[in-house]
Image: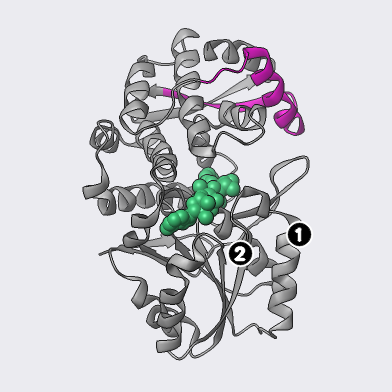
Amino acid sequence: MEIIKVNASKEYEVVIGGGILPMLGKKCASLFGKSRAVIVTDSNVAPLWLEKAKESLANAGISPVEFVFPSGEESKSMKTLFELLEFMAENRLTRSDFAVALGGGVTGDMTGLAASLYLRGVPFVQVPTTLLAAVDSSVGGKTAVNLTAGKNLAGAFYQPSLVVCDTDTLSTLPESEFANGMAEVIKYGVIFDKELFDKVCGGNVKSKIESIIARCVELKRDVVAKDEFDKGERQLLNFGHTMAHSVEKCSNFEISHGSAVAIGMVIAAKASAKLGWSDEDCTDMIINANKNNNLPVKCDFKPRELADAALSDKKRSGGTINFVVPRVVGECYLQKIPVDVLYKIAEFAE
Ligand code: NAD
Ligand code: GLY
């Protein structure tokens, strides 16, 4: 088992290990006493892991109520958020009580936002059950729901009080969802850590997943400690994401976030090398890492479509964006570019 302490506007532990879900109740009781909790989870995760989580809380003297919503990105909406808030109020949860997000990034992002709003803020605990949530979304306090105009447009920075990552929950994850999480792992390697990249680029990572998750969480902890509110260095975590958001949008969200990030990283690496921004051409290394981890390396959308989508996404940020450039595998930097340069970058999608 690994315990990583995050030191942001709130200090909290991220506990990672196989079979640790039964510890959830005890950990929560030591933080919140014998209070009440709402467990929020989706319709796929509920039949698999909800009973275990409930039992763990109940054994520690915490009475849980459960809110189960239909799985999928469409549920990360104002509608479900509103239903969750109403549910918390109907169940008369107080400021001494807390929420538990049992699931992937959709569950975690929405529960965190509900916790930040309900009674002007109640604590919440992240229990990530996807690899993506374990390595990325459960840590760092970005919470949000989507609006019609785009993803994550209504949100808050609101840190959890605890993260309990039981790696056994990943055993029920479909392979395609595991691969989605690997895109974010590869991303951490390219941005910060060549050793991590080398460890995962050949695929076959399952036997070492606990140490991989722990390393990603350490890297995220460090960047969040320096730039919790995303003013600078934290934006490095967006490597591959500019074009990834376009790929997701152009596919009407049929292409998952992880697959889109995998494609976006290839485009970003190729463009950065060809435009002379990188010290080494990382493209082939990223392509191989993606392939070995069952991730795509390109999409069929036309460069103009991708750039138009990226531009409509970025209009709000004015005339320039911070584009993440890999200097070498293991080190990235932010390059301020005029938004029009996105058309040039998108050409490398072909
Ligand atoms: P998700 O929560 O939709 O989970 C993916 C799928 O896996 C769902 O169908 C879910 O029901 C299923 N699932 C979850 N755990 C399972 C398990 N153990 N066994 C079987 N099935 C399981 O999506 P995700 O990929 O975890 O997260 C994507 C979301 O995270 C996006 O909305 C994205 O915007 C957000 N995100 C947030 C941050 C952040 O910093 N807050 C970072 C990255 C991504
Ligand atoms: N997933 C990007 C961030 O947390 O900043």
Number of residues whose C-alpha sits closer than 10 Å to that of mark 2, classed few (under 14), some (14–19) or many (20 or more): many
Count up the numbered dots: 2
Left or right of residue 295: residue 94: right
Q: Which mark is residue 195?
A: none
Residue range highlighted in magenta: 299-326
Please name the residue shown 56% across and 30% down the image: 244
Residue holding disc 1: 79
The residue mark sitting in front, 2 or 1, is 1
Which residue is situated farthest in the front direction here?
47
**Which of the labelled discs sits on residue 111, or is there none?**
2
Q: Secondary structure at mark 2?
A: helix
| Residue 302 among those drawn in magenta | yes
Amino acid type of the residue that numbered disc 1 sits on in the rendered structure: Lys
**What's the amino acid at mark 2?**
Thr
For the residue carrying disc 1, how many other residues have a C-alpha within 10 Å: few (<14), some (14-19), or many (20+)?
A: few
Which quadrant holds residue 345?
top right
The percent position of residue 296, horizontal first and vertical second, equals 44, 26
